[in-house]
Image (cartoon, helix red, strand yellow):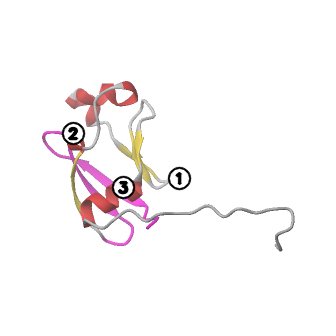
């Protein structure tokens, strides 16, 4: 997919309205996809949760603590499409470039 997030707005009850570069938009309930532990623990505070912002360098959303979410996963949640299975190529010394 590799679609960048271009805008995010907070909604009630840990929901985010997310806009992608290809025009896809939708609401994701973050409380249903993460546990509020570790790096995500501060997000349980609704005021802190509302500090979410777009990191345009990497095309996703993030919070000041450094917590972020995979834009492919969020795109799949909104569109109900499966997440693509990326495969890393193996290059050996004998492989042509």
How far apart are the alpha carbons under marks 1 and 3? 18 Å
Image quadrant holding the N terminus, namely bottom left
Q: Are marks 1 and 3 in contact (CB under 8 Å)?
A: no
Q: Is tag 2's residue or tag 1's residue first in the polypeptide sequence? A: 2
Asked if residue 12 lies in the magenta stretch, the reply is yes
Q: Dot 3 corresponds to which residue? A: 73
Identity of the residue drawn at 34% across and 31% down: 40
Chain-order first, disc 3 or disc 2: 2
Q: Position of residue 66 (x, y in %)?
A: 45, 34
Q: Which mark is residue 57?
A: 1
Quick one: quadrant of the C terminus?
Answer: bottom right
As helix, strand or loop, the secondary structure at mark 3 comes to helix
Per the rendered image, the range of residues in magenta is 1-23
Residue 47 x/y as whole percent: 23, 29
Query: What is the C-alpha distance between the residues marked 2 and 1?
Result: 25 Å
The relative height of residue 40 versus residue 90 in the rendered view (above or below) is: above
Q: Secondary structure at mark 2?
A: helix
Q: Is residue 28 left or right of residue 69?
A: left
Of badges 2 and 1, the one in the foreground is 2
Residue where numbered disc 2 is placed: 31
Residue at 70%, 62% in the rendered image = 90
Q: Quadrant of residue 62?
A: top left
């Amino acid at each position: 997919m590799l679609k960048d997030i271009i805008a995010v707005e907070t909604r009630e009850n840990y929901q985010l309205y997310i806009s992608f570069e290809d025009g896809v938009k939708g609401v994701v309930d973050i409380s249903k996809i993460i546990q509020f532990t570790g790096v995500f623990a501060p997000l349980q505070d609704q005021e802190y949760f509302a500090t979410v912002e777009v990191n345009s360098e990497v095309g996703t959303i993030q919070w000041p603590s450094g917590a972020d979410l995979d834009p492919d996963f969020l795109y799949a949640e909104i569109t109900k499409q499966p997440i693509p299975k990326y495969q890393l190529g193996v290059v050996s010394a004998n492989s042509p470039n």
